[in-house]
Amino acid sequence: MKDEILMENKSIVVPGEVLAKGMSFLPGPGTYRRDDVIVAKKVGLATVDGKVIKLIALNGTYLPRVKDKIIARVIDVLMTGWRVDINCPYSAVLTMKDATNEFIPRGADLTKYYDLGDHMLCQVVNVTSQNLVDVSMKGPGLRKLKGGRFIKVSPYKVPRVIGKDGSMVSMIKKATGCDIIVGQNGVIWINGDPKAEVVAVKAIKKIDKEAHLSGLTDRIAKWLEEAK
């Protein structure tokens, strides 16, 4: 039997769809081997990287990983820290020791540091098998985010929003003059002139909607030029 790829590169595939046949191809993320064929595990964007068949999921919840930089929101003030929403089915905890280099005395009013509703750029430092997640504010660039607006995209579209070597988000920043931070959990902070923020939001939502289509960078560049 001749080894061959049975789908077009960057095409949308569904669970159970056969993507390639032959032992010369290797199953990558989102795919598996069944006898001598490679099959899709879920709905996604199928790509060919050399001899590896990969699948980029188009939807799904964020699954935290250590070292991820994410945007979180304070949802509870605890005795020893804060509980934060990280845009996934379970929350995370920011302890006092991971919140600041300052000494926080016992019994201090923790809302003076982070209050309910505050947003922050933080980093995942621990994920247990029971889905207990710890985050930290100690690291380069990690900080409380003030002003601006927050939007959400599919966590699986984050690489497309960022672009290769940050090219896509840099293009939006340059066109709008906005400060933009993209969290790995799909939460994005946009801060700038209110009208420019609206343009940036629309551009990012367009990327989220059209992430599976080819020629995305050129389309967004043209759209931004027309929006200006």
Image (cartoon, grey):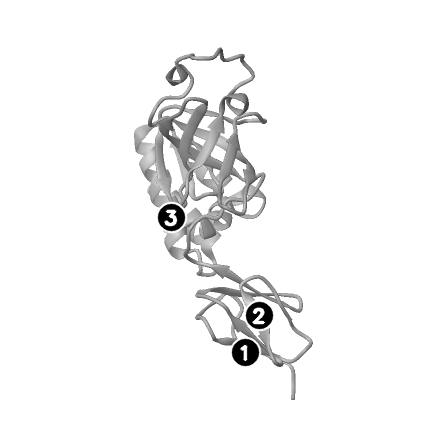
- Left or right, 123 with respect to 90, comes to right
Question: For the residue marked with disc 2, what is the amino acid?
Answer: Tyr
Left or right: where does residue 63 sit relative to residue 54?
Answer: left
Q: Nearer the viewer, residue 27 or 202?
A: 27
Query: Residue visible at 49% across and 45% down?
Result: 131
Labels 3, 2: front one? 2
Position above or below: 175 against 214: above
List x then y, in percent, for residue 99. 50, 23
Residue 89 screen position, x and y as percent: 39, 46
Amino acid carrying label 1: it is Leu
Disc on the earlier residue, 3 or 2: 2
Q: Is residue 71 above or below residue 59?
A: above
**Left or right side of 90 for 195:** left
Residue where numbered disc 3 is placed: 223
| Residue type at numbered disc 3 | Trp
> Which label belongs to residue 6?
1
Q: Name the secondary structure under disc 3.
A: helix
Q: Tell me how many marks there are.
A: 3
- Residues under labels 1 and 2: Cα distance? 15 Å
What is the C-alpha distance between the residues marked 3 and 2? 38 Å
